Amino acid sequence: MSTKTRTVLTAGVLAVALGLGVTAQASAGAPRSVGGDPSDNLTRIADFYGAYIDAESDPDGSGDLPTALRAYYVAPTYLKQLQAWEDREHADGVLQAQNTPLKWKVTGNGTAKNHTEAVVTLTWSRNTTTKLFVDMSRGSHKIIHIGTKGLGAK
């Protein structure tokens, strides 16, 4: 290989590497924004799941915060149903599992006359996910259902 060919190849590789480096650095350094609106049910469901999973993941937590979050975000009548589900299934009714997920994502799934539905995707490990349908009252902004099917699918 001639010196000229080697120089051109080196310059090409360097240009590609620099280009990728700039792209990766720009995307890695870009600021992220998270917003919300307390009167928006989708935001409230995301806020609840984010705070609840954080509280459940805290190794130093006293266990009082998840209970307080449930009292604030979940309708009192549904709290009784949630407790009955937990007693029967021996698992956390909010997560419908015995452990805490690594990640979560909330996606809107439509609205009905009296409630908003979201799909909460919980990620447990590599590509292992669970989808829960969470329904929130449009009037009280309280969770009225958590399950593997939404209220409209019953």
Image (tube, rainbow, N blue to C red):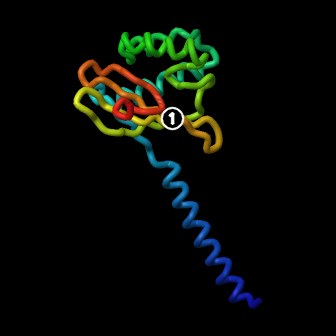
Q: Residue at x 57, y 39 (%)?
A: 129
Q: Position of residue 7 (x, y in %)?
A: 68, 82
Secondary element at image label 1: strand
Q: Residue at x 31, y 38 (%)?
A: 110
Q: Quadrant of the C terminus?
A: top left
Within 10 Å of disc 1 (Cα), the crowding (few <14, some 14-19, many 20+) is some
Front residue (pair 154, 57)? 154
Question: Count the marks: how many?
Answer: 1
Toward the front, the furthest residue is 154
Up-down relation of residue 154 to residue 107 (above or below): above
Q: Quadrant of the N terminus?
A: bottom right
Would you name the residue on which mark 1 appears?
A: 104
Front residue (pair 62, 26)? 62
Q: Residue at x 75, y 90 (%)?
A: 2
Q: Going by the image, does 109 lie left or right of 82?
A: left
Toward the right, the furthest residue is 1
Q: Going by the image, does 98 lie left or right of 41?
A: right
Q: Position of residue 38 (x, y in %)?
A: 30, 25
In which image quadrant can residue 116 be found? Answer: top left
Q: Residue at x 29, y 28 (%)?
A: 115
Kind of residue at disc 1: Trp
Q: Position of residue 17 (x, y in %)?
A: 61, 67
Q: Position of residue 6 (x, y in %)?
A: 71, 84
